[in-house]
Image (cartoon, rainbow, N blue to C red):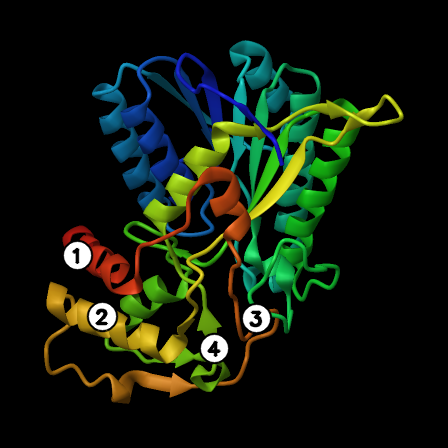
Amino acid sequence: MSKQTIDLNGKTILVTGSPGFIGANLVIRLLRELTAGRVISFDSMNDYYDPKLKEYRLSKIEEAAKASPVSHVFIRGNLADKTLVDRVFEAYKPAVVVNLAAQAGVRYSIDHPDVYIESNLIGFFHILEACRHNPVEHLVYASSSSVYGGNKKVPFSVEDKVDNPVSLYAATKKSNELLAHSYSKLYNIPSTGLRFFTVYGPAGRPDMFYFSATQRLSRGEKIQIFNYGNCKRDFTYIDDIVEGVYRVMQGAPEKAVGEDDLPLPPYAVYNIGGGTPENLLDYIGTLQEELVRAGVLPEDYDFEGHRELVGMQPGDVPVTYADSTALERDYGFTPKIGIREGLRAFAEWYKTYYG
């Protein structure tokens, strides 16, 4: 697909979901890379996980802002508040919008469905409406590898049929893609969806397995390994995710007119994944080695005594595997950071943060 090049310098960029995990790292990258413009962070700072971690990331954003020629504004609010969203767009007129705000987590959606409808559907609708009524050059938004559900064909391609989600979280993310496509078609809004594959790294989400397992092991508790360890995940390090998002922001789907003189939807979806799925037991083994190396756990730690093999969890899938050839073709980028390097960075951060 042809792309319209966007120079981010001098532009106002809105990043929702900052200071979430991906959002915070993206904002810091923008503050360090750009030489002019403004970055608007927007987040509700909810307590889905420890808010202190979000405060920590926000402090890192503020540190980067002090050393940056780019101005930064943080707005605390909920995307479900349409009046506030409209006011932000009216006041700041963002040229590029990166919507990363969402209620994450597959298992949490089983018992808390209302939160997903409010954030992932109503909130995203408000973003689309605001883009419709303002001169937005490019909307980039977070989708998820969860949309592939129990897809047996690997690697997962954006051309695959994804009409059978196995969790409400996955259903909301697929709905985001459908809504974005309709708004791109009806209102000629350039939009790009990004299907993230198991993002990990320092200061990540504590509900993600590598983080929660580390917390349990450091407390002397057992970790549960689902599907008896017969899982494979396409783990993607945070720096690779941010690099992919940063490149995509600069290349919007080009506007064009069809034979009926109506706009062809300037719309695209990409996978961002490592392309090398790791066996869960191997991943855990590497994590344990790096936790010992960093001094989080003692060298004589009894790992076997702290493992419990259990069955598959509802809403979970046995394999995720990204085909990222389209991303490489259109943006010249494929994730490259391996799990050893990524987990080492996480373990060292964990030791510093938690002591």
- Up the image or down, 94 lies above or below 58; here it is above
Residue 239: x %, y % from top left: 33, 46
- Indicate which disc residue 218 carries: 2
Q: Nearer the viewer, mark 2 or mark 1?
A: 1
- Up the image or down, 41 lies above or below 121; here it is above
> Closer to the camera, 98 or 206?
98
Residue drawn where x is 19% and y is 68% of the image:
291
Residue drawn where x is 30% and y is 25% of the image:
33
> Closer to the camera, 90 or 191?
191
State if disc 1 and disc 2 touch (CB < 8 Å): no
| Disc 1: which residue | 348
- Up the image or down, 323 lies above or below 37; here it is below
Label 1 SS: helix
Q: Quadrant of the C terminus?
A: bottom left
Q: Is residue 278 left or right of residue 298?
A: right
Residue 309: x %, y % from top left: 42, 87
Q: Amino acid at mark 2?
A: Ser
Label 2 SS: helix
Q: Earlier in the sequence, mark 2 or mark 3?
A: 2
Q: Nearer the viewer, mark 4 or mark 2?
A: 4
Q: Amino acid at mark 1?
A: Glu
| Disc 4: which residue | 231
> Closer to the camera, 82 or 164?
164
Q: Quadrant of residue 314?
A: bottom right
- Up the image or down, 270 lies above or below 265; here it is below
State if disc 3 and disc 4 touch (CB < 8 Å): yes
| Disc 3: which residue | 316
Label 4 SS: loop
Q: Is residue 348 left or right of residue 58?
A: left
Disc 2 crowd rating (10 Å Cα; few below 14, some 14-19, many 20+) is some
Q: Amino acid at mark 4?
A: Cys
Q: Is residue 112 visible from the viewing direction of this image?
A: no
